[in-house]
Image (cartoon, grey):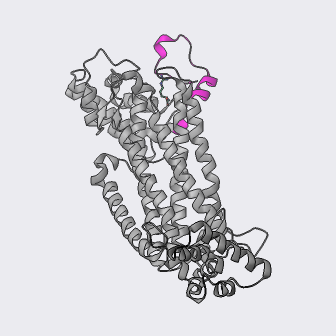
Amino acid sequence: MSAVTLWHGRFADRPSDELLAYTASLPFDRRLAGDDLTGSRAHVRGLVRAGLLTGDEGAILIAALDRVEVEIEDGSFAFRPGDEDVHTAVERRVTEIAGDVGARLHTGRSRNDQVATDLRLFTRRELVGTARSVLALEEVLLDRAESAGDAYLPGYTHLQRAQPVLLAHHLLAHAWALARDVDRLLATRRRLDVSPLGAGALAGSSLPLDPDAAAADLGFASRFANSLDAVSDRDFVAEALFDLALLGIHLSRMGEELVLWSSEEWGFATLADAYSTGSSMLPQKKNPDIAELARGKAGRLIGDLTGLLATLKGLPLAYNRDLQEDKEPLFDALDQVRGGLAAMAGLYATVELDLEAMRRAADTPSAAAVDLAEWLVERGTPFRQAHALVGGLVRDSLERHVPLAELVEAHPALGTAALGLLAPGVAVTRRSTPGGAGPQPVAVQIAAYRGELAGQRRLLSARGVGPSADRQEGTPAG
Ligand code: ARG
């Protein structure tokens, strides 16, 4: 027990080993070191502006914080077992470096507003990084959609073949979901862009600190309106976890599809060697492990979200130590999603699609059943009657083992004129309404998606999200 805590004045006894072991957050919150230093530098400048530090004292503290940053980056920073959390570790080291002035660093500040500030800085940047990784996967999907040409495959409902759709249309269905993910991540980022610095432990300060100036210094869009809310609000973590969980669910659905497509039963896809795994026993196996883990990890991401929500639900105002439990789920969700996005981008960029197998599966005559009904509608038959008529022909064809084409040709209301609808590749070309699955609307859609990505690229550029988003992009995980 070597610890000197930040609170030792009030205590006659030292903290027990059990307490330190159970309550420490340093093993995971050291990941916030870079943001803690950013927040502390802003706080020092605020203390100088307030006349609570001389310019010289401020300079000594900033220099000490800079040195801590170098030590953390080059790995020479010596975390001590008694450092309860990253804030303690940094303040301890600053005091070792700066001497007596170090004791002034925490003036007017609490770890409660400090940790909230650190975590907002961290999340603000990480959400942009995540959105950029989503964009990379979106680009892969767009690329594959553009090169899919007029390839088509069965579209399914209830996992039963329903109507043929262009492959580009199918790929872009996933891509639009990802576009909404980017939207959501950036909306969450916008809402969290509020500085808690200056809220103190819970009630603000008697010292002449200026939270507006602190917010501006840190590049936040605004400061907190209510100090109690500032230190107890973790909505932004919950929102980020929801965004990540839903993004993970999208990756899971894409993964599930590749599992099916790469099975022998489907035979639509062959995964690249570099993105599949083998079996330790069965020499012939090639397994879609990335796709399966994208599916499996969605459960964990949902757990990260629900765990935090459960932590938050009973908390009285304002800060409670329970809030320390916000970090691990957030870090985990970010890591898992970023890893999943990179792996799925590689998988999608390299998967070989068997367009011939897709075409064969889509070209069953009954795939054009609704086209026969709509052909009758165009000639005046009420849709319900047309539906019943075609349904009867399909049943007849199945029961008597007569090709549907023969029955269509022989039917007085249909005949040879309608037969063309059953020809391979015809049905998909007839989906012509806006947003539909046929060649004309899909060409429009591809152009729209290209525009969407151009907009996202702009938003996610350093200019779009502001220079602060790029600061410390590479902060080591600890
Ligand atoms: N490690 C703590 C956390 O992550 C920092 C804040 C501690 N505040 C306190 N009053 N004990 O929440």
**Foreground residue, 75 or 226?**
226
Residue 276 visible here = no
Taking depth in this image into account, of 26 and 388 the one nearest to the observer is 388
Q: Residue at x 34, y 19 (%)?
A: 204
Residue occupying image coordinates x 60% and y 51%: 298
Q: Nearer the viewer, residue 161 or 356?
A: 161
User: Left or right: where does residue 378 sit relative to residue 270?
Assistant: left
Q: Is residue 11 magenta?
A: yes
Coordinates of residue 79 in the picture (x, y in percent)? 49, 36
Residue 107, position as x, y percentages in the image? 33, 21
Residue 195 showing in the rendered view: yes
Please tell me in which quadrant of the rendered image residue 210 appears: top left
Residue 440, how many percent across, how many down? 42, 75
- Image quarter in which the N terminus is found: top right
Instruction: State the image quarter where residue 270 is shown.
Output: bottom right
Query: On the picture, is 291 further left or further right than 39?
Result: right
Instruction: Tell me if residue 217 comes above or below residue 112 in the rendering.
Output: below
Q: Which residues are magenta?
A: 1-28
In the image, 421 versus 325, the foreground residue is 421
Image height of 87 relative to 331, above or below: above
Q: Position of residue 361 (x, y in %)?
A: 64, 78
Query: How many numbered circles does the render carry?
Result: 0
Q: Residue furthest bottom?
A: 416
Please say if 275 is above or below 41: below
Q: Is residue 169 magenta?
A: no
Q: Classify 178 as above or below 271.
A: above
| Residue in the picture at 59% in, 32% down | 310
